[in-house]
Image: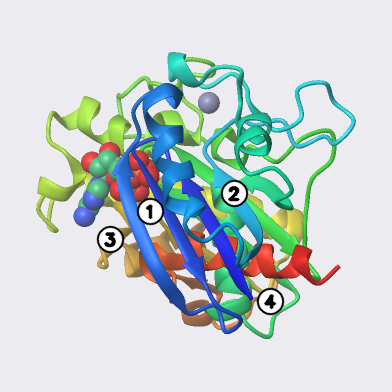
Amino acid sequence: MLYGAIEAGGTKFVCAVGNEKLDIIEKVNFTTLSPKETMPQVISFFKKYETQLSSIAIGSFGPIDICPDSKTYGYITSTPKISWQNFDFIGYLKTKLKEMPLYWTTDVNAAAYGEYIDGHGQGYSSVVYYTVGTGIGGGALQNGKFIEGFSHPEMGHMIVRNHPNDYFKGNCPYHQNCLEGMAAGPAIEKRIGIKGQDLPEDHPFWEIEAFYVAQCIYNTTMMFSPDIIILGGGVMKQVHLQTKIHHEFKKIMNNYVDLPPIEKYIVFPKLGDQAGIIGCLGLAKKIASF
Ligand code: ADP
Ligand code: ZN
């Protein structure tokens, strides 16, 4: 039996088919355009496997509607990407792939699940995953289940304190200086005029970035005391940030609680950019076994 995975990102879509061992058999990437242009590419990829597929899991950018009783379950809801606003993602897949069992969650939940089953989260019961990229999103797992209620968490929009030397006002259209407004890739570029990937390692801004990410970890620790916090996404490709984040986090924590060894507690993803797609394959396998 085969399983399908769709990582629906705001920048690119990744579709994959994997086997029982979650080894990837085929994978394709394409740029996220409008649903009219992008969704037929998704369908044509899966059509050739349709009879062999047990299920497909989707990890999508959001916000998305995950409430099974809601009229708009399976929709991407209030995204700033206009052509995707109120797009009925699951409804579309159901009309094209008729009997296919589908699992619907956020892109970060999928990545959290990937790390939980096959990455640094393996063997732990409580795992939190953040992505720091075009936006900031977080997913939290407790005993294999996602933490959610009326909707999925939006941890990237937590409120943070401003760094005393940071005069940037923040660029979140809803909250201005929330975590995403201060520390996601576009906030770096807007503040400094240079993309994060082009900013040298010794630029003083990285201390400020670490200060915000450390607050995120502090808040997460105080709320969930998870076993591990995994930091992914483009901005976290700055490997030198890890020590800076550890340092800032220890300062904020001020020895208030005994923590797991910090190098094991705050880590970068073992699966790298594959966390989301492996997570989707794992979720597809999980629903197929019910
Ligand atoms: P997305 O969030 O769109 O899925 P990414 O996680 O790659 O994609 O995030 C893209 C953002 O991360 C951009 O704002 C980009 O400038 C920033 N970024 C990408 N690579 C790096 C890097 N190596 N260092 C710092 N910032 C980066
Ligand atoms: Zn915000």
Q: Disc 3 marks which residue?
A: 237
Q: Of label 2 and label 4, which has the lower sequence position? A: 2
- Which circle, 2 or 1, is nearer the viewer? 2
Q: Are marks 2 and 4 in contact (CB under 8 Å)?
A: no
Q: Is residue 255 visible?
A: no
Is ligand 1 within 8 Å of the beta carbon of the residue shown at mark 3? yes
Residue at 16%, 39% (x, y): give it. Answer: 195
Is ligand 1 within 8 Å of the beta carbon of the residue shown at mark 1? yes
Q: Is residue 71 visible?
A: yes
Vertical side of 211 occupied by 231: above or below = below
Q: Amino acid at mark 2?
A: Ile
Q: Is residue 290 left or right of residue 207?
A: right
**Label 3: few (<14), some (14–19) or many (≥20) C-alpha neighbours in 10 Å:** some
Q: Are marks 4 and 3 in contact (CB under 8 Å)?
A: no
Vertical side of 228 occupied by 276: above or below = above
Q: Quadrant of the C terminus?
A: bottom right
Q: Disc 2 marks which residue?
A: 58
**Label 4: few (<14), some (14–19) or many (≥20) C-alpha neighbours in 10 Å:** few
Q: Disc 4 marks which residue?
A: 258
Q: Disc 1 marks which residue?
A: 233
Q: Of label 2 and label 3, which has the lower sequence position? A: 2
Q: Amino acid at mark 1?
A: Gly
Q: Amino acid at mark 3?
A: Lys
Residue at 49%, 36% (x, y): give it. Answer: 179
Alpha carbon distance from label 3 to label 1: 7 Å
